[in-house]
Image (tube, rainbow, N blue to C red):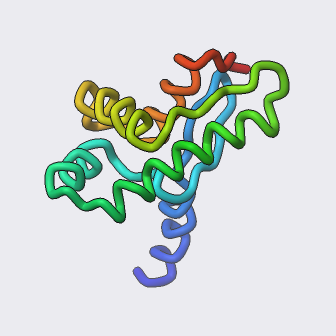
Amino acid sequence: MKSASWKVVPLLMLPALVLGADLVTVRGAGTGQCKDYLEMRRLNNSVDTYQVAAWVQGFLAGHNVFAGGKNLVAPDVDSTLVEIDRFCQSHPNKAISDGATALALRLGAVKR
């Protein structure tokens, strides 16, 4: 049993985000689930909440560096959290990265 379990661990360590037809590896705060994020917000956990906002803003900055074309202007921290709050309330079983993707699209990103 132990010899088989180590083969599963790498798969669990590589959360992915689908952008267009591509599968993209995502790490960090964006891999968290919306339902967990909403609980964190309910508990007013400002440190973890700021980490999510910083991750989303970094996601948008990464778009600007690599996508070319339209330069997305990331909202301030409070507005970023409002956007993720809205997404997660509507989609509690999705990942925070899905909310970041939705925000990027709303700001004008184009799917590949």
The residue nearer to you, when weighing 78 against 89, is: 78
Residue 40 placement (x, y as % from top left)? 23, 55
With respect to residue 22, does 7 lie above or below?
A: below
Residue drawn at (58%, 50%), measured in percent from left and top?
26
**77 sits left or right of 61 in the view:** left
With respect to residue 32, does 110 lie above or below?
A: above
The residue nearer to you, when weighing 39 against 19, is: 39
Residue 74 placement (x, y as % from top left)? 58, 33
**73 sits left or right of 35 in the view:** right
With respect to residue 6, does 31 lie above or below?
A: above
Residue 70 placement (x, y as % from top left)? 76, 19
Residue drawn at (30%, 60%), measured in percent from left and top?
46
**82 sits left or right of 3 in the view:** left
Residue drawn at (25%, 61%), measured in percent from left and top?
45
Point out the image quarter for the N terminus: bottom left
**60 sits left or right of 80 in the view:** right
